[in-house]
Amino acid sequence: MTDTTPTTDDTTRPTRRLSEAGVSIWLDDLSRERLDTGNLAQLVAEKDVVGVTTNPTIFASALAKGNAYDATLSALAGTDVEAAVEKITTDDVRDAADVLRPVYDATGTVDGRVSIEVDPRLARDADATIATAKRLWATIDRPNVMIKIPATEQALPAITAVLGAGISVNVTLIFSIERYRAVMDAFLAGLEQARANGHDLAPIGSVASFFVSRVDASVDAALTKIGTDEALELRGKAAIANARLAYAAYQEVFSSERWQALAAAGAQPQRPLWASTGVKNPEYRDTLYVDELVVAGVVNTMPQATLDAFADHGIVIGDTVSGTAEEAAATVAAIEKLGISIHDVTRTLEEEGVQKFEVSWDELLTTTKTGLDAAGA
């Protein structure tokens, strides 16, 4: 693993050093409380946050805590629960987009973005995903929003079509290099459609959310079960290696002639976004999935705990990704030699990821219905 002994001036806060290294820090959380208290604006000012990601789990958690949504639920009493959920989530995302609009303008539309996910129950229905994405985009009506679409095989055409309509997209739940390549192809096809449809390519933003920690959680369990010294030595290395190989694929695709033609027309690249960066194993450094994935031109979206940990003691020594593909490939090969298929692991993680978001969506509907019922009693 990379030697991450600090060598920079410690008088500069770690989040600022990370930003100066070219990594955009996004917060993987949003709630009405963050907006009402000014906490989000504070994080922008004090911890260099320049974007926000949301998902059904985040919204379900926000609705279940405290009373920040009481007034909204009272105003929506008697409303259909799914319509109420869309109203609550789009209002939060619109207000967050307004908080981040100065960042969006200052960075030339690159950052200052806020993501909202389509109903995860539509993950394998491209037509319904397209329709929902267009409705969310029109409802929120902010240029610095991204619509999150899962990277299921069935949703790939939706990614292309939504980008082709001039709508910014965050592609989520990417675990494998193979699927990531398909996502990048869908992105390029989408921008080609957008250009053909007469859209200005410059403000169309996109990120590809490549999940990190869940890979280690799965592979580590298999390595521990094997139990040999060789297997145990490989724990905590699969996720970083997988992400670094993803970055190598990104470099390849975004140096192609196909991409250069779009860039010449004003397009922004689809940046890799490191997601699921909270460390799940307490034996690992709590900033592992930030420290080891520093490279210019990427996004790292962090839950609050990871952001706080990195702001306190994160390590930035420069680029820890470029030139690591060969070593990463060797790590993956060593893991597979022990009988662990990274392909099988990532396929399972995608299926579980969609299922988990479906469960969270159901929780969000249930919590909202309970609130609506109480407000209308």
Image (cartoon, rainbow, N blue to C red):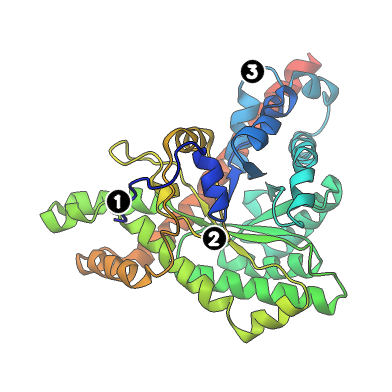
User: From the viewer's perspective, is the residue at label 2 or at label 3 nearer?
Assistant: 2
Q: Amino acid at mark 1?
A: Gly
Relative vertical location of residue 291 with respect to residue 151 in this rendering, above or below:
above
User: From the viewer's perspective, is the residue at label 1 or at label 2 nearer?
Assistant: 2
Tell me the residue that label 3 is attached to.
66
The quarter of the picture where the N terminus appears is bottom left
Image mark for residue 296: 2
Disc 2 from disc 3: Cα separation: 38 Å
Q: What percent of the width, then of the height, locates residue 252?
A: 52, 78
Q: Amino acid at mark 3?
A: Gly
Tell me the residue that label 1 is attached to.
236
Q: Amino acid at mark 2?
A: Ala
Task: Report the number of numbered marks.
Answer: 3
Q: Which image quadrant for residue 226?
A: bottom left
Residue 364 seen in the current view = no
Disc 1 from disc 2: Cα separation: 23 Å
Q: Which image quadrant for residue 128?
A: bottom right
Q: What percent of the width, then of the height, locates residue 233?
A: 19, 54
Which residue does the image show at 69% across and 77% down from the upper left?
189
Q: Residues within 10 Å of mark 1 (few under 14, many from 20)?
A: many
Disc 3 from disc 1: Cα separation: 36 Å
